[in-house]
Each structure stands twice: as structure tokens, then as C-alpha cells.
Image (spheres, helix red, strand yellow):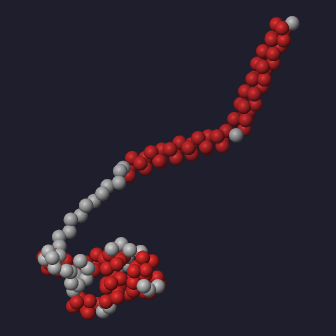
Amino acid sequence: MKRHVLIYGLVGGVLIVVLKLTEYRFLVLEHSLEIYGGLTAATFATLGIWLGYKLTGRPRVVVKEVEVPAQAAALQSPLPGEPFLPNERKCEELGITPRELETLGLIAQGLSNREIADKLFVSENTVKTHSSRVFGKLGARRRTQAVQLGKEMGLLP
């Protein structure tokens, strides 16, 4: 009796497997365009990512040395022990007020607008106004550019 049950079970299992494979075969035939399209898309996506990494390579860092004229170097670095004095003539030419110069100095220290406002006891909007006026007078678009121009013009140490 156990032998008959085992044989019927195995035959039933084999028939189920055959039916599932047949069903799978018809499923593959019915949706072959979608399957091949998906495989092609995955292949090209993988190839594109690999090729992109190969072509771009590692990021390169370029170091550029810039020569500083002797006069600008003398303005930027006073003798040891002497305090830095901003170029008053350049401040007058540009029309930079002492408060705007002070704001530029705090920007050069890396402070945010809120920190500058707290330090100068003014509102954050006032700091924004001073900053935008300094940027306009120096011809700068960003904080870092304003600091760089301020140093080149002898306004900052």
C-alpha cells in the first residue's frame, strides 16, 4: 500500500512539474518581447555605467601656483610685531565704510551672517546689507571671492 501511494505521489509530482514547465514555456513565449527588452535594457545600462567609470576615471586635483607681486606681498604681511593697517586710500577709492570693512573682516574669519550679527550687535538683515554693499564695491559674487579681493587690495591681513 505504501508503495502505491509513493508511486502515485511521484507520478503526480512529475505531472505537476511538467505542467508548470509547460505553463512557464507559454508564459515566456507570450511575453518574450518584454523579457528580451528588459534583458537588453539591463545589459546596456550595465555597459553604460561601466564605460562611464572607465572614461571619467578618478577625479584629478589641479594645483595652480600664483605669483604675488612684491608690492601686494608687502601690503599683506607687515613686519613682525607691527599690527596690520588696512589700505585707507583703497577704502576711500572704493567707498567702503569702516562698518563694511569690519563686516568683511568677520566674513574672512569664516563667521556666518548670524554670528556676525551677534558680534556686531545688529540684525542679520543689516549684516546682509553690509555684505552685499561690500560685494558690490569689490565686484565680488561670493564670500570667498570678496575675501580674496580684500586681501589683494590690502584691506585684510
| Residue ID at (41%, 48%) | 53
Residue 47, image x, y percentages: 48, 44
**In the displayed structure image, the side of residue 118 where residue 29 appears, left or right:** right
Q: Position of residue 19 (x, y in %)?
A: 77, 25
Whether residue 87 sits left or right of residue 35 in the image: it is: left
The quadrant the C terminus occupies is bottom left
Q: Could you tell me residue 98's position as x and y percent? A: 31, 89
Q: Quick check: 62 above or below 16?
A: below
Identify the residue at horizontal 82%, vertical 7% (top origin): 3
- Image check: 115 left or right of 33? left
Residue 65 % position (x, y): 21, 65
Q: Name the quarter where the N terminus is drawn.
A: top right
Q: Does residue 36 sit above or below 95 in this rendering? A: above
Report the residue at 19% width, 77% height from top.
76
| Residue 68 or residue 83, whichever sits in front | 83
Instruction: Report which quarter residue 155 is drawn in.
Output: bottom left
Q: Residue furthest right?
A: 1
Residue 139 visible here: no
Does residue 134 appear anywhere in the picture?
Answer: yes
Residue 101 vs residue 119: left or right?
left
